[in-house]
Amino acid sequence: MHQAYSVHSILKQGVQIESIAAYGNHVILGTRSGQLIMYSVDKETGVDMRMFNKNFSRKPITQMEVIGAENLLFVLTDYQVQVCDISRIESNFAFMHSSPDTKGCTLFTMDVDSRKSTTGDVATFIRVCCAIKRRLVFFFWKQNILASLKLSIDLSDVPRTLCWVGHAVCVGYKDEYVIYDISSKTPKKHDLFLTSSSISRDPCICLIRNNMLGISKDSYLVVVDPSRYKDTDGTNSSTEVRPGGMETNSSLTPLLWTSPLLDLVWDEPYAVGRTNNAIEVRSLVGRDTLVQSIPELQKTKFLVHADKGTIFAAATSELWCIRLVEIPIQRQQLLQQKKFQLAIELTEISEEPAKDKAQTIRQIHMLYAKELFTNKEFSAAMKEFEKAAIDPYDVIRLFPNLVPEPKPGNEDATVPISSTPALEDGDLENAYLALIEYLALARQREVVKLRDTKSSSKSLLEIIDTTLLKCYLQTNDSLVAPLLRLNQCHLEESEKTLKKHNKISELIILYQMKGKHKDALQLLQEQSSIEGSVLQGRKRTIRYLQELGTDHLPVIFEFSDWVLNEHPDEGLSIFTDELIEVESLPRAKVLDFLISKHKALVIPYLEHLITVWKDSNTLLHNVLIKQYLEQFQRLLAQQDKGEEVSNLKPLRAKLYKMLEESNDYSPDRVLEQFPTNMLLEERALILGRLKKHDKVLSIYIHVLGDVGKATAYAEANLNDDENIFHTLIKCILVPPTEPPYEGVALHPDFVQVNREMALQVLNDHATKIDPFEIFELLPDDLPMPQLEKYLEKSIRKKLSDKHQMQMMCGLLEAEAKRLESAVEAQRNISFELNEFSVCPECKKRLPSQSAFVRYPNGQIVHLSCHDRIARAAAQQ
């Protein structure tokens, strides 16, 4: 304990005190004989009587409440509330108002609320709740009278004490406490708890910290939050059972006193209560709540709070002033007793300069944190370090195993290492967990600082993350990987720590986030062949390479080499997987790499680009055709040597399909590389793209002897060349003297004129072949009856075309005559404009010299009106 208050005797006289009120340094006494007395109590001038009214009432003054801001005194005497003016000393409690509606009042409580208006004026709102028999009746002070609030509550018993705070009124009966929510139209009752668990006791209620209720039960003070009982959704707030049979929904533990409370006042940060044997001063924080006991005031009957640090106590005929001891003196005693929380609360309400106050509070938090850490209350210690806002590095230095080296320029740590206890086993783990929570919050602040101010917090952030890494390895290594991905850990220190704990997978993440890709990939390559390693195999390497992207292309090529050598098909996914980073790689450079180092994978890579990714790059299409061609030639050479080749036909099928379906390769470039003594059918496809129909048909007829394909080709290109069937017949009827390409034999069926095939083509496609052009190619000895079918179809086609032409000429001539008649009819239309003609748009007359437009419906408008209408229609 320490001395929080000093006691000063003020009066020892014969008046019988029945009630007491106070404000500032003034105390007002109400006597049993109906007198009102005001004293002013000053440290320097002493006690001075300011007002005295010996005939205020013929009955005892049973209760008083003073509102110093408004100079009003509310007095309960003869079961009626009266209001006095205390603004002037000479008025001696000048009577202002007595409300007849309060007749029968035995007890009252008040709610005073000061609000600032938009103009800056402060207005005070005063409400009064009177207990009249078994009812609560509500009033408000307006224009110097107590007006009714039109609100009343029926009670189950006569109340012994009342307390009003905001939307709630707490009522203490002889045996229980209840609280009423008056925020809605219909007040709602909430039962709290009994006044005592065993015997009947007088209730005691006090306002704590302006908006909380301190309620006495047995020897306990229970703190209740009235806001929990505000009915916002139509349901009552739930309560929880506390030790001793108490129910409360406050987070504060019930405060134990030496004996039941008889009276209570709140003077921040102390609860000052009157018990059977003394006046006790207690704090709501800490384990030892008793601050001071004042046994010399055990005979007091009244306690009232006047101002911050000033309390008045009274007995039947005596009066004392209880004053707060100066805060610096109290703080020194509290720090010696290691009551840091109370020292902080006192400092917060002190009148010291704000800067000095903040520095003092910070120092106390630091001392408190150090004490908690020494007592192995690590979580609470870290919260105090957080409140002290000290450098996180100084907290880390409490753990020697976590500090790699002294921080440059900060050898004198705020928290000395030598004063901390040695931590082992379970204590060490708990300390690590508390440190993790602290550093996580510190990290958030540093990240925000780094982002918003671009300050030098990066070095501190590096220390925090490296320390978190070490803590996670000791407590929960599943958090190591997410931390490393934040990319703020110190590389060398983290690398050493991870290797010490054999966290190879996490070490890869560290290298990756620090941009040490070669180190990571070298480690992956080494681990890939180690039996039992978590990184055994090549999947992690493949995924790592896929995520690197274009900026690290040389590294990708360097470390993909061993994967492609050992597992080509799987390794190719480094360049073909469905990932954004993979698809964005420069494909020409990848192709060059595969051609130079892994030629067997060129075709699969190009096939993926073209068939899966639908790449239309002409270069890629040309290269794929070239690769098909070179592969085919190699396989063909192997076959010529007598080796068994199984995939020659599928490869040629791919080449043929590519040449036939692709529209993105360059036929002239491909043709330059194409052989002339093989793959002539494929060559025909390329020549077809170049529109060299005569060469295509020559290959189909003279080399391949395939009239069907030649005919199909002619059909497909008829729109492009209407004489293509003439070229086809010419190939059949005029055999070449030598093959079209060196090293290629002519087809035996077409070494000489193949009359049968020529007649078949003539008969099947008679309408597409002009007889005037074909007769000169026919053999002289060809019998005319063999041409009968062809000539019949050809002549019919010519006649049909002629008849159609004649019909079209007739129709066009008729249409021309019809149009001429229509034009003439329009020319013959006449109309008259005179002085009475009006434009239907602007309603103005049409003068004879103005330009106008006549619509098909006969309306005539100004040309300007027509233009305006046309522009408006175009804008819609």
Image (tube, rainbow, N blue to C red):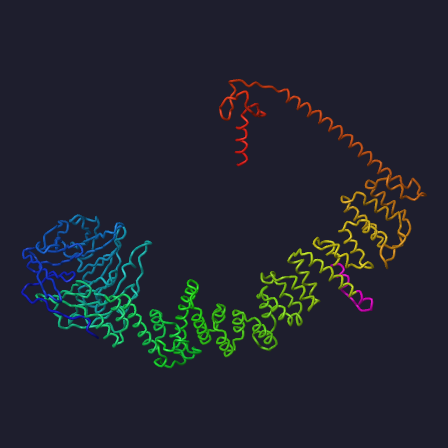
Q: Is 654 left or right of 395, judged from the image as shown?
A: right
- Residue pushed farthest right? 781
Residue 201, image quadrant: bottom left
Q: Is 169 left or right of 74, judged from the image as shown?
A: right
Image position, residue 89 (x, y; %): 9, 56
Which region is colored magenta? 636-654
Image position, residue 388 (x, y; %): 33, 70
Q: Is 320 left or right of 655, judged from the image as shown?
A: left
Depth check, front residue: 302 or 54: 54
Image position, residue 457 (x, y; %): 42, 68
Residue 703, image quadrant: bottom right
Image position, residue 634 (x, y; %): 78, 66
| Quadrant in which the N terminus appears | bottom left
Asked if residue 422 can be seen in this view, the reply is yes
Establish if 475 lies above or below 192: below
Depth check, front residue: 144 or 722: 722
Depth check, front residue: 819 or 459: 459
Depth check, front residue: 863 or 71: 863
Q: Is 552 left or right of 253, judged from the image as shown?
A: right
Main SS class of the magenta portion in the image: helix
Query: Does residue 845 belong to the magenta stretch?
Result: no
The residue shown at (65%, 56%) is 614
